[in-house]
Amino acid sequence: MAVPSSDIRETDPEHPSARWESAPLDLDGYLARIGHHGPLAPSLDTLRTLQAAHLDAIPFEGLDPYLGRPVPLDIESLQDKLVRRRRGGYCHEQNILFATVLDRLGFRVTGRSARMLMGADEREITEIGHTLLSVVIDGTDWHVDVGIGSAGPRGPIPLVEGGEFATGSWNYRIERSRLGHWLLRLRRAGGWFNLVHYTEERYYRADYADQNYVVATSPASPFVQRLIVQRNGADMRIALTDLVVTTHLPNGDKRTREIAPGQLPETLRSVFGLDLPGELERELVERAGRPRSSDWSDAAYGV
C-alpha cells in the first residue's frame, strides 16, 4: 500500500508530526483491524472516516491496570495489544496509536494534554493527564480524540470559539474557558456537560510516559480501583463500570443493569468485542468479585 514516507517528518523537529515513530507501524494490519478499505489521502474526509472506524472497532478499556499489569506505550506494544490481540486501551494508548497512523498517512498531527473535567466547573484545576490530538488540515486546527471513553466526539471538531458541532448523533460545543483554555462540552440531558480543557502547548510521546505511569499504577487511579470498559457507538454508548452496565442514547435516555462476576466474559465479548484468553477472563472474574476499597463517582469517567 503506497503511503507518504515519514522519514522527513521523523527528522524535522519543526514539523508538528515529528517523533511519532511511525516507521515501524503495521499500517495494513491497523486498517484491517478497523475495517477501513477507503481512501488514505490526508484529507478531512479521511480523518472523519478513520476516527469513526477506530471507535467502532477498538473499545476503551483499562483491564491491564485493573489487574496490576504494565501498560507500555511503544508502538510495537500498542499495535500488538490493540491491533493483533484485538484488545482496547485508554487515552494514552488509543491516541498515540491513532496519531502514529495519521502521521504515517501524512497528516500534520500534534499531541496535546488536557485536564479532565467530566462535569466539573471549568475553573477547577484538575491534573493534566488526558492525551488528545490536534490535526491541522488546510490551515484549520481540528480537535481529535479517540480516547475519552463513551463521552468523546466520534469525529474531528474545529477549534472555533463558540462553535457547536455534531459528530453523528452527539452534539458538542467548543468554548474558551475562564482560564483562557479550550473547553470541550457535550450536550446532555439538562444542558452542556464539561469534558476537557487544555492549552495549545505541544506534547510528544515522551511527555506521556509519566502521566501513563500514574494512571496505570497509582492506588488512587480509577483504572487501578475499578473495572472500566466503554464503547463509543454511533447511536448508543455503553459503559461497564465494575459490574454495572450503563447505556446512553442520544435523546438523553439512560439504562442500567447489574451483572454477576461470572457474566463478565460473555458481556465483554458480546457488548464490547473483547474475546479474551481464558486465563485473563478468570483473573477478571476473580478480581471483580472482591469488595472495592474506594467509592468513585461514575460521572467522573463519562459513564
Image (spheres, rainbow, N blue to C red):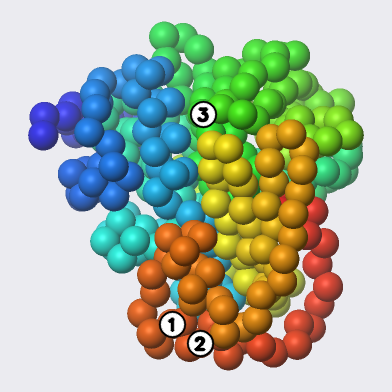
Please tell me in which quadrant of the rendered image residue 168 appears. Answer: top right
Residue receiving disc 3: 155
Which numbered dot is residue 283? 2
The reply to whether dot 1 and dot 2 touch (C-beta < 8 Å) is yes
The residue under label 3 is which amino acid type? Gly
Task: Bin the neighbour count of mark 2 within 10 Å (Cα to Cα): few under 14, some 14-19, many 20 and up.
Answer: few
- Relative to 240, does residue 197 appear above or below in the rendering? above
Where's residue 96, x and y in %?
A: 43, 47
Task: Answer whether labels 3 and 1 touch (C-beta < 8 Å).
Answer: no
Q: Earlier in the sequence, mark 2 or mark 3?
A: 3
Alpha carbons under labels 1 and 2: distance apart: 5 Å
Which three-letter amino acid code belongs to the residue tagged 2?
Glu
Query: Distance of mark 3 from mark 1, alpha carbons?
Result: 32 Å
Image location (x, y in percent) of residue 248: 69, 46
Residue at far top of view: 138
Q: Which residue is mark 1?
A: 280
Height in image: 114 above or below 217? Answer: above
Q: Nearer the viewer, residue 73 or 40?
A: 40
Residue found 58% across the figure and 37% down from its top: 235
Quarter of the figure with the N terminus: top left
Q: Residue at x 43, y 26 (%)?
A: 48
